[in-house]
Image (cartoon, rainbow, N blue to C red):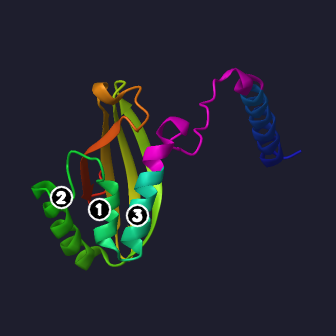
Amino acid sequence: MSKRNIRRLEYLFFGGIILLLFLLFLPSVPLRPVKAQPTTGDSYKELDDKIRAFFDHLISGNTTNAFDNLLLQSPLGSSSAPVTEIRTKLDETKKHVGDFHAYEFYLAKPVGKDIVLIRYILKCEYYPVIWTFTFYRKPSLQGSTGTPWQLVEMRFDSNLDI
C-alpha cells in the first residue's frame, strides 16, 4: 500500500470518528422551537377585523370609507388634525410606493393589560409600507356590552427598520 492510500484511509477513519462523535452528541444540544406564524389571536379578533376592513377599503381606492369606519367611536375622530395629516401623507406616499395591492399581519404586541400595538405590512407596487395601530382599553368601558378598545394612534412608514 502506498503512502498516498494510507493517508486517505487515515482521513476516512478520523473523519468517520468525528462524524460519529458529532451524531452521538447532537441530541443533547437544545434546539430552539420554531415560532408559529403570528396571528392576533382571539382576544384581538375584533380589532383585527376592523383593520382588515380598513385595508380592504384602501386597496379598493375608497380612502374615505377606510378612515371613517376605522375611526368610528375613536377619540381621534375622522376629521381631526392628526387624521387629516395621515390622509395627506398617505396620498403623497402613494405616489412613491405605487398602488396598494395586499396586506399582511405582522405583529400584535400587548403593552401591559390595556394597550396593544398591531402592525401590518401594506404591500404596494414598489415598496411595502408598515402600519402601526395602537388601541387602548378604557377602564370606564371594560365590562360594557360594546368594545372597550379604542384606536388612539395610527401611523405608517415606508422605512423597513422594524
**Mark 3: which amino acid?**
Phe
Q: Residues within 10 Å of mark 3 (few under 14, many from 20)?
A: many
**Mark 1: which amino acid?**
Phe
Q: Which one is earlier in the sequence, the residue at label 3 or at label 1?
A: 3
Q: Residues within 10 Å of mark 1 (few under 14, many from 20)?
A: many
Name the side, left or right, on which 100 lies relative to 27: left
Q: Are marks 2 and 1 in contact (CB under 8 Å)?
A: yes
Is 120 rendered above or below residue 89? above
Mark 3 vs mark 1, foreground winner is 1
Which stretch did the figure color magenta? Answer: 24-48
Is residue 26 inside the magenta stretch?
Answer: yes
Give the labeled residue for mark 3. Answer: 55
The answer to whether one can see residue 162 in this image is no
Tell me the number on the disc at residue 67.
Answer: 1
Q: Are marks 3 and 1 in contact (CB under 8 Å)?
A: no
Name the side, left or right, on which 59 lies relative to 29: left
Give the labeled residue for mark 2. Answer: 83
Q: Nearer the viewer, residue 5 or 49?
A: 49
Residue 45, x across and y down, in percent: 50, 43
Residue 73, x across and y down, in percent: 29, 47
Marks 2 and 1 sit apart, C-alpha to C-alpha, by 8 Å
